[in-house]
Image: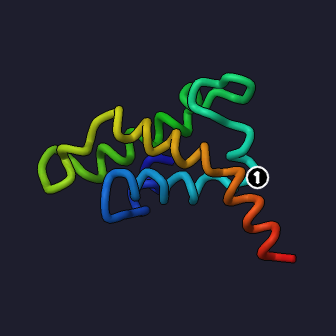
Amino acid sequence: MTKRLLTIGGFSVRNTTMNMLKYLLTNQVAIKFNWSGKDKKPFKKTKMCCAIIDAVKLSYGTSGPHTSDLSDKVIKESIQDWLKLAKSRYTYNLKKDT
């Protein structure tokens, strides 16, 4: 899975992380997760989460303009933000399609 995720790019660590999430999860599925699992499924314990973190780190390497953002904290916060907005994206798309 990590190899496939490496083909998904972005203009920053945050954007790349969110693009990978968008590729892997629909908003309908993402609604069932949050980072820690309080009242939902814990995303941080999934193999998918590990694959995303590994792929983001591999895609930016150890040098370049975005390496200062290449921390677990930035990737984790990006995932949390994306999951937090899943319900809004889902309801927006439902309204848009009707």
Residue 51: % across, % down: 47, 40
Q: Quadrant of residue 22?
A: bottom right
Of residue 18 and residue 5, the one placed in the foreground of this image is 18
Q: Residue at x 50, y 42 (%)?
A: 79
Residue 95: % across, % down: 81, 70
Q: Residue at x 61, y 50 (%)?
A: 85
Q: Tell me the amino acid under the disc marked 1.
A: Gln
Q: Residue at x 55, y 39 (%)?
A: 48
Q: Judge from the rendering whether residue 29 lies leftward or rightward of residue 57; answer left or right.
A: right
Q: Residue at x 38, y 52 (%)?
A: 14
Q: Is residue 94 above or below residue 55?
A: below
> Outermost residue toward the left?
63
User: If the image is split into quadrants, where does the C terminus sit?
Assistant: bottom right
Give the residue pinned by disc 1.
28
> How is this picture coloured?
rainbow
Determine crowd level at label 1: few under 14, some 14-19, many 20+ residues with C-alpha closer than 10 A: few
Total marks placed: 1
Residue 62: % across, % down: 16, 44
Q: Is residue 38 above or below residue 80?
A: above
